[in-house]
């Protein structure tokens, strides 16, 4: 007789039922719950806990429970008390790296949108990338290939690898035109990232743009609001907000916020599916069983190629393709529509939008077709990772 495995999982993990309802060698009892119902009482007799970012996994939740493995289907894991989990021999995992391509697609679409709107000129911009891990490294390489000057800031990597390719934050504040953050949220230590961009840093920043698609609290949001107030040429792009799911209303309404989205940069269908695949494989490794669930088998068929009417401006062409693949304006407009809601209503809208996010295919699964395939169009599309269909 197979041993019983009690799994409690957030009901909003993509594909959770197909991935975790059957595990080789176990009689699985899978219970799907809303985050608000994942409590110390409900998890007491669980063996496995699968969450998203809204569930804080710590002593308050797991003390005295039978949970021996916990995983979050998210890149970030600052909602996990990893020190306590390790001290109590509870294995844990995250989905770090799973949504890299999705966030890159968000970032490229954002940069192209800023370029088309005249807020930046991509070939003439110096971008300072704070946090050069999986996402930051890939973004840096793409930006350099697009002709941008890239300054990389990553103190842990600089200590381990030397300073040849890394710059201190002071240099980015002095030289970069825009800053983008891709760090984890670290609450203490020499690499603490809480309010990494605070009043002191923003007062010295000589550029004009801030992009945060990393962790909301890495930027002091009230200070950012004041920084935008002081110069009409300044702008911010925010996918991550302090105090999610209730962002600062003044910041959401601020005219200097060029693009506002509710923490969905990593929410392409492929990104969400990969989140699940990462924690599924981590659980299989923990249980010492062979993984059999295949993410690709559960994704819908790729869409027909998006046809782009190509003009003479390669940046316009690339922007048209990017926004056809990912209509970022729809996410921005949705969030703007919450401007006049109360704090509690705003939080509900923020959460609901993320849970019911419209399917957005990753670029590798969604090809484009340009009516004129000039060499410069193909080169730019290749740099940013688009799949271009050619005439045969």
Image (tube, grey):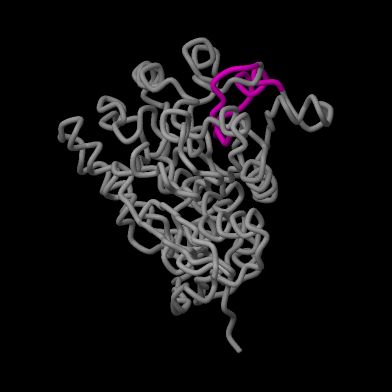
Q: Nearer the viewer, residue 365 or 144?
A: 365
Q: Nearer the viewer, residue 76 or 93?
A: 93
- Extreme bottom residue here? 392
For the point 62% across and 60% down, the residue is: 284
In this rendering, would 321 be left or right of 228? right
Residue 119: x and y in percent read 45, 38
Q: Is residue 339 above or below residue 51?
A: above
In the image, residue 270 lies in the stretch drawn in magenta: no
For the point 45% across and 69% down, the residue is: 18
In this rendering, would 70 be left or right of 258? right
Residue 202: x and y in percent read 50, 16
The quarter of the picture where the N terminus appears is bottom right
For the point 39% across and 32% down, the residue is: 241
Q: Is residue 127 above or below residue 228?
A: below
The quarter of the picture where the C terminus appears is bottom right
In the image, residue 179 lies in the stretch drawn in magenta: yes
The stretch in magenta equals 168-189
In this rendering, would 384 be left or right of 113? right
Q: How many marks?
A: 0
Q: Nearer the viewer, residue 17 or 89?
A: 89
For the point 79% across and 33% down, the residue is: 165
Residue 137: x and y in percent read 68, 43
Residue 231: x and y in percent read 39, 20
Q: Is residue 84 above or below residue 146?
A: above
């Amino acid at each position: 007789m197979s041993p019983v495995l009690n799994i409690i999982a957030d009901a909003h993990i993509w594909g959770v039922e197909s991935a975790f309802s059957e595990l080789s060698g176990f009689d699985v009892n899978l219970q799907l719950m809303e985050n608000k119902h994942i409590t110390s009482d409900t998890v007491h007799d669980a063996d496995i806990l699968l969450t998203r970012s809204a569930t804080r996994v710590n002593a308050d939740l797991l003390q005295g429970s039978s949970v021996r493995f916990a995983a979050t289907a998210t890149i970030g894991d600052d909602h996990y008390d990893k020190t306590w989990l390790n001290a109590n021999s509870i294995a844990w995992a995250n989905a770090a790296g799973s949504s890299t391509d999705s966030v890159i697609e968000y970032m490229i679409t954002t940069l192209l949108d800023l370029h088309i709107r005249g807020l930046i000129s991509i070939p003439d911009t110096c971008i300072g990338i704070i946090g050069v891990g999986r996402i930051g490294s890939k973004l840096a390489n793409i930006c350099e290939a697009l002709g941008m000057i890239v300054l990389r800031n990553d103190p842990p990597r600089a200590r381990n690898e030397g300073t040849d390719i890394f710059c201190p934050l002071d240099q980015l504040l002095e030289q970069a035109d825009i800053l983008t953050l891709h760090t984890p949220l670290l609450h203490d230590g020499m690499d603490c990232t809480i309010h990494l961009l605070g009043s002191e840093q923003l007062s010295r920043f000589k550029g004009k743009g801030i992009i945060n698609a990393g962790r909301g609290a890495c930027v002091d949001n009230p200070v950012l609001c004041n920084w935008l107030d002081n110069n009409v040429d300044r702008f911010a792009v925010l996918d991550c907000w302090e105090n999610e799911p209730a962002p600062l209303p003044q910041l959401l309404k601020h005219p200097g916020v060029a693009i506002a989205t509710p923490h969905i940069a990593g929410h392409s269908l492929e990104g969400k599916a990969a989140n699940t695949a990462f924690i599924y494989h981590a659980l299989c490794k923990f249980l010492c069983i062979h993984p059999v669930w295949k993410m690709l088998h559960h994704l819908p068929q790729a869409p027909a190629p998006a046809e782009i009417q190509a003009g003479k401006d390669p940046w316009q062409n690339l922007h048209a393709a990017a926004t056809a693949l990912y209509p970022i304006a729809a996410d921005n407009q949705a969030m703007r529509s919450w401007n006049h809601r109360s704090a509690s209503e705003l939080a509900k809208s923020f959460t609901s939008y993320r849970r019911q996010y419209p399917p957005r295919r990753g670029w590798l699964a969604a090809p484009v077709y340009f009516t004129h395939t000039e060499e410069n169009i193909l080169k730019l599309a290749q740099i940013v990772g688009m799949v271009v269909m050619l005439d045969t």
